[in-house]
Image (cartoon, helix red, strand yellow):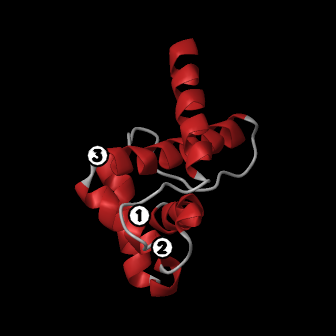
Amino acid sequence: MGGLHMRFVAWGILGLLCLAGPAGADDDQSINAVIKFAQKDGTWKELVLGAGSGLAAANAVLGQRGQPRLFCPPDTMSITADQYVSFLASYVKEHPQAGTGRDSFYSLVLLYAMKEVFPCK
């Protein structure tokens, strides 16, 4: 369990670092740009994975404490980087105003996406 905990902590720290917003190759600093880059570039995809893993770690801690979780994926599901990017892209497609926000808020928009994809009953 210690290795899994350290993995969550490491991804969580990476996710928090992502809150500062990654630097892009062009002037577009929107969440739409994050999605575009993550669909093409492994580094950007890993940044989205880091944010998702940080959210998953926070979610697990809430569950262990008996507090309401942020979102409720199946217990046996392991979410991949591609899935996180897909959830983010789908959410922005359904809520276009979310894609125009600053890139530094993509982890927050990912949280909204996760809550929509995996609502808690």
Question: Is residue 113 at all visible to an observer of this figure?
Answer: yes
Local SS, label 3: helix
Please name the residue that numbered disc 2 is placed on.
30
Q: Are marks 1 and 2 in contact (CB under 8 Å)?
A: yes
- Give percent across and percent down for residue 64: 69, 34
42 and 78: which one is in front?
A: 42
Please name the residue that numbered disc 3 is placed on.
42
Please name the residue that numbered disc 1 is placed on.
34
Quadrant in the rendering for residue 115: bottom right
Query: Of the numbered discs in the image, which one, if any, rests on residue 20?
Result: none
Quadrant in the rendering for residue 38: bottom left
| Mark nearer the N terminus (3 vs 1) | 1
Pointer 1: residues within 10 angstroms few (<14), some, or many (20+)? Answer: many
- Give percent across and percent down for residue 48: 43, 51
Q: Is residue 39 left or right of residue 55?
A: left
Q: CA distance from mark 3 to mark 2?
A: 18 Å
65 and 87: which one is in front?
A: 87
| Quarter of the image where the C terminus is located | bottom right
Kind of residue sitting beneath label 1: Val
